[in-house]
Amino acid sequence: MWKKKEEKKEEKEEDLLKVLCGDDAKLRDFLGHTLYLHPLDAISEKSLDILTEEAEKSGNFRPAVDKAIFEGSQNLGESERYIKVIQNLASKTIHATEQEKDKAEKEGRTDKTASLEREIQDQRFMSERAEDVLNVASKFYNETLVKLGEDARRALRAETRREAYMEERRIGKLEEAGREARKKERREMGREERREAEQQDKREELAAEERKAARAEERREAEREEGRIEELEKTGREARKKGRERD
């Protein structure tokens, strides 16, 4: 069942990318293996400059490219600068990959050369379509971050409900234990003392019922608030969907 849920989620993300790219199959295919469903986890927190320096030493430019696309997607007002950065990184990646490809060809590793050639073609495509890459990445990542935020808040609310339920059970057990202890004590009391204790127990039980009713009302209010939040989130999703369709 869990696998089916994951597959369904991935299918929704793929549908989003399909909507954003329209009939541009090449752009959709490229971004399909370039963008991340969890960008904040997948993309390095290091600065773009540091990642570029590290890439020039290691020959692995992917972390820097990922950072440039994500950063540029969140700063479209500086798109011209990020387009140049992406194109520069693509050029460096192509150069490093061509060297690796030449080495693989000399060693007769045809399987390796084929994958390296695909990488070179991808980088050329990214360089040529850098503006489109940033525009689609911006919409994709913005929607993805909104969804991740909604998921995180939903999980937090679920955890709060679980903790409230566990606290309710703990209080119930304490109250039950208290009643049993007082019942045991009454067996050893005299008639007058027992009658006063029974009256006190009734007052305690009444107070306990009132507290239980108050907690039940708090749960109902929390559920109503959950419904209001989910309705707002749904309205927001529908509005963003209509906006994408207009674009």
Image (spheres, rainbow, N blue to C red):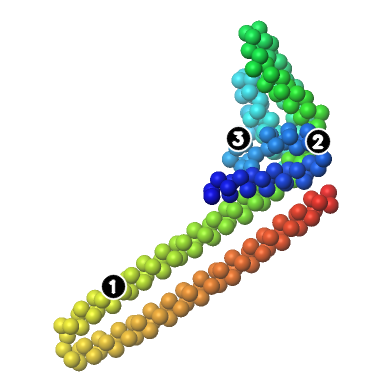
Q: Residue 132, located in which quarter of the rendered image?
A: top right
The span from disc 2 to disc 1 (Cα, nearest Å) is: 69 Å
Residue linked to disc 2: 131
Residue under pointer 3: 44
Residue 177's label in the rendered image is 1
Q: Residue drawn 34% across and 86% down?
A: 203
SS category of the residue bearing label 2: helix
Residue at the extreme right: 246
Residue at 66% x, 25% y is 61
Residue kind at label 3, given as amino acid type? Ser
- First of labels 2, 1 by sequence position: 2
Question: Residue 221 location in percent, x, y?
Answer: 55, 72
Residue 205 position by quadrant:
bottom left
Circle 3 packing at 10 Å, graded few (<14), some (14-19), many (20+), is: some
- Number of the front mark, 2 or 3: 2
Q: Residue at x 61, y 42 (%)?
A: 38
> Can I make out residue 96 in this image?
no
Observer-side mark, 2 or 1, equals 1
How far apart, in angstroms, are the residues tagged by discs 1 and 3?
A: 53 Å
- Local crowd at mark 1 within 10 Å, few (<14), some, or many (≥20)? few
Pinpoint residue 36: horizontal percent, then vertical percent.
65, 39
Identify residue type, mark 1. Answer: Ala
Question: Is label 2 in contact with label 3 (beta carbons under 8 Å)?
Answer: no
First in sequence: mark 1 vs mark 3: 3
Figure check: 37 above or below 157: above
Going from N to C along the chain, the mark reached first, 2 or 3, is: 3
